Image (spheres, rainbow, N blue to C red):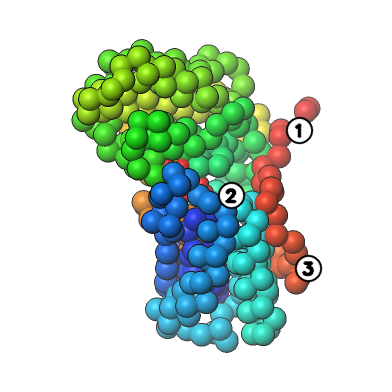
Amino acid sequence: MKILGIETTCDETAAAVVALGEGERGHILANEVLSQIAEHAAYGGVVPEIAARAHVEVLDRLIARALQRAGTDLAGLDGIAVAAGPGLIGGVLIGLVTAKTLALVARKPLLAVNHLEAHALTPRLTDGLAFPYLLLLASGGHTQLVAVKGVGEYVRLGTTIDDAIGEAFDKVAKLLGLGYPGGPEVERLAEEGDPERFALPRPMIGRREADFSLSGLKTALRLEAERLAPLASRDVADLCASFQAAVVDVVVDRVRVALRAFGGVAGHPTALVAAGGVAANGAIRRALAAQAGEVGLGFVAPPLPLCGDNGAMIAWAGLERLRLGLIDDLTVPARARWPFAQAPQAS
Ligand code: KG4
Ligand code: ZN
């Protein structure tokens, strides 16, 4: 089984070909990603109109390259998967219309994939992980703790009531005058800084629900930065380190609460999983690995290129759906908003 995956929901244009490999894992035959970071950097964030235009300009060539690298052509595919949302609607439409056209012309099944579901299923692509597992999905737009019970069976145990974790990293970077995207920059500087210099708050710690709140932490950091201005490079590094340490503490506490709730909705987890762009953060990965070890669980996080947005995860989610016969027709809509996990049922 060989699936083409197309991703255009944000600022990465991506196309990949994934086959079913050994041990219920995916075998990535090609994984082409073109980042638009340079186009958006001057604005300190993603500009939807620029993103959509950039996707149009490169997507067809990127797909051709992915097929070529995978040693196949359209006829050799078993299905065409595309992220149909959630995301910036202009970009989503470009990917979806392209995928529909290819599916129609090549007479292949169309698989409209939820971008968040694709992040959530990535540990099955990389490690063949069995259901159910506890997922921390953290990116620039989303922060959720989810019990992943099966394909299409996702129970939300917690979410953020304000900023996403990646968004908080990006905002902190911006207010400290660092580059975009902020996560990798903040992490790099945090390594040189003193995580204990600033006593920043740890919002939500101790709450019974596994929800997050990050805007208060971000504001506390801004006040410290304003108090110290103009900032020396030492100050910036210490602020980054203190911020990241606070985020790590919050994440570990929220995951603890979610692990407690997990049994009630999904039984015993096979592993703790981190996915989404924020899962690239080494401090968060190390803390979660240690935490999982303490409760006798494995920890799985995708290799760095598969943490951020990519086509392989879309192809894999499409492959999982195709195996279950979950094929879409050409009327499937592009969705700016598309929640993928349900709240737990009251019992
Ligand atoms: O999943 P992703 O590539 O795109 C979506 O938002 O869907 O995630 C991007 C987010 C950005 O907010 C970025 O700052 C954050 O992930 N990120 C990180 C790191 N690398 C990327 N956050 C913290 N530490 C990192 N090393
Ligand atoms: Zn993403």
Residue bearing the label numbered 3: 331
Q: Disc 2 versus disc 1: distance between alpha carbons?
A: 21 Å
SS at mark 2?
A: helix
- Point 66% across, 71% down: residue: 97
Determine whether 114 is above or below 272 in the image: below
Where, quadrant-wise, is the C terminus in this rendering?
Answer: top right
Q: Nearer the viewer, residue 46 or 59?
A: 46
Label 2 crowding class (10 Å Cα cut-off): few <14, some 14-19, many 20+? many
Q: Nearer the viewer, mark 1 or mark 3?
A: 3
Label 1 vs 3, first from the N-terminus = 3
Q: Is mark 2 within 8 Å of ligand 2?
A: yes
* Residue type (three-letter) at the residue carrying disc 3: Thr
- Point 55% across, 26% down: residue: 212
- Point 41% across, 54% down: residue: 37
Q: Disc 1 versus disc 3: distance between alpha carbons?
A: 31 Å
* x and y percentages locating residue 128 in the rendered image: 47, 56
* Dot label at residue 116: 2
**Left-right relation of 40 to 329:** left
Q: Disc 2 versus disc 3: distance between alpha carbons?
A: 21 Å
* Residue type (three-letter) at the residue carrying disc 1: Gln
Determine whether 208 is above or below 53 in the image: above
* x and y percentages locating residue 84 in the rendered image: 65, 60
Determine whether 331 is above or below 230 in the image: below
Q: Is residue 125 visible?
A: no
SS at mark 3?
A: loop
**Left-right relation of 131 to 231:** right
Is disc 1 in contact with disc 3, using a CB cutoff of under 8 Å? no
* x and y percentages locating residue 176 in the rendered image: 35, 31
Total residue callouts:
3
Q: Nearer the viewer, mark 2 or mark 1?
A: 2
* x and y percentages locating residue 98 in the rendered image: 62, 73
Residue bearing the label numbered 1: 345
